[in-house]
Amino acid sequence: DSGLIASITDNGAGGISSSIGEMAEQTGGVEIDLAAAPLKQVGLSAWEILVSESQERMTVAVHPEHAEAFEAMATIHEVEATVVATFTDDGRFLVRHGEDVVALLPLEFLHDGVPQLRLESVWSPPKHPTFVPPQAADHTALLLRLLARPNVASKEDWVRQYDHEVIAQTVVKPFVGVERDGPADAAVIAPLHGSSRGLVVSNGIVPRYADIDAGAMVVAAVDEAVRNAVCVGVDVDRMAGLDNFCWPDPIVSEKTPDGRFKLAQLVRANRELERMCRAYRVPCVSGKDSMKNDYGTGADKISIPPTMLFSLFGDHPDVRMTATSDLKRAGERLYLFGRCRQELGASEVASMMAESGEAQGIGGVVPAMDDPEAQREAYAALSGEIAAGRIRTAHDCSEGGLGVALAEMCIGGRRGAMIDLDGLGLDGADTFGQLWGESLGRIVIGVEAMHEAEVCNALERHGLTLIGLVIEGERLVIEDGFDVLIDVAIEDMVKAWKAPLALPVGGER
């Protein structure tokens, strides 16, 4: 903000050799003194200092006339700042350790001396037995089991170990509702003193879908991050993202004979990332890639699933007009924004039932986003209604689908709801798919009677279905037009949701 920094980057792969070496392209050369670098342990050799990837370090370029002011600001904020290099224009990458020259390379050779790799990818869709929902399911039992799944269960004890107040500027915290334990979709902070303008921070991650298609995994991650931000009223015209890749080694070798397939997964992931970000108009301003997440060899080799965490930040025009996931008051009408499709492939319920032996596999249709530009238009309309103060309750449908989303809303507000799924099957989803499918673009909203006509008029063309209302009682009841599918007390849902990942009182698990 003060204009003291000319350039900045983090110290990732290759440490300062990479960060300073990349910056040096802008000036045409650099001279580094490794002896000046602060060390976490004594005795490191020069090459270790040069390529060390110690965390929490940034490389900052500062013009000489700003150096004193920059160092003073670093002192105020108790951040260690050390001069370790000077940029030049002599075309050299020169590294010293005190008086000793330990590396000297032409900068052009450093960046362009090695030919670019030419890699081959081969895509062959993974084969999984199709997930077949049971004919007669106990949906109440399924809901309680899903709430206890690690991907769904409350992470409150973990999150509260960290400071999320941000010097008393946090408007929407990680947990919301009457007991401050309901899950928030995104965080909202108001960093400008005296201003109601805010910043939205959200995330999306669905590694399960990569078991079927890594491209679909990325689509879902991007949409989830945007969807979560929309739930609190982000300005969809002012968003930016960070694509964070964690991947198994995608280069074919003796250790990685399936490298061509893993590279194909990466190709599909990046193509979908570009498609979604262009359609949503979300530039990727930063990110990371970690491409060697494997351990062991042969039959003992363990590789992580292809994973991308999509993080998003965006502008909030007025933090006084936001929405949270908890149900607010009896009589509030509940609508599903978006459409239910029969998309159960690699879903949380499919994974759960396959693990328990109740189903043969997780295969099937993975949630898709055929027209992200139309979805962006829909999100803009919904976010506009939140910004206008006509919607104060919103929660996205993600892991566990509509059933879990409704349960989390009841938990947050400690209020019950009467739900009727009749009318949700117009896009091909049966009752099981309506409850537990994870179709993208869906958000449950609560609307008070005084705003119902305006909200419906603004959102109907984007897919809006009345599904129920908030009640005084403390039970969630879901019907399908004929039969009661779920009838459960909020207390039982809270217990199922909180117990699995709770830490012992006064200690750590």
Image (cartoon, helix red, strand yellow):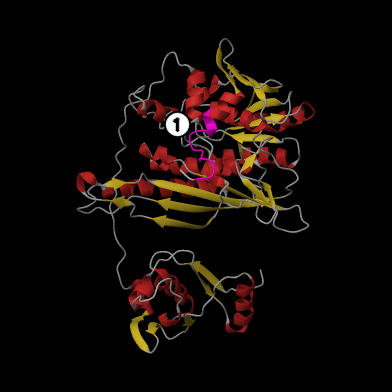
Which residue is label 1 attached to?
Answer: 348
Quarter of the image containing the N terminus?
bottom right
Question: Where, quadrant-wise, is the C terminus in this rendering?
Answer: top left
Query: In the rendered view, does 57 fall on the left or right side of 327?
Result: left
Q: Name the foreground residue: 105 vs 353.
A: 353
In the rendering, at what x and y percent does residue 256 appear?
24, 50
Q: Residue at x 70, y 53 (%)?
A: 168
Residue 61 visible: yes
Tell me: 412 left or right of 36.
right
Q: Is residue 377 above or below residue 6?
A: above
The secondary structure making up most of the magenta span is loop
Q: Image height check: is 478 above or below 89?
A: above
Magenta-drawn segment = 496-507
* Residue 493 point in image, percent of width and height: 56, 26
In percent of width and height, residue 198 lies at 69, 52
Taking the image as shown, residue 335 lies to the left or right of residue 312, namely right
The residue located at (64%, 45%) in the rendering is 173
Residue 422: name its quadrant. Answer: top right
Q: Residue at x 48, y 82 (%)?
A: 87
Type of the residue with mark 1: Glu
Q: Quick one: 504 or 84, which is closer to the camera?
A: 504
Q: Is residue 394 above or below residue 356?
A: below
Q: Is residue 4 visible?
A: no
- Residue 467 inside the magenta-drawn segment: no
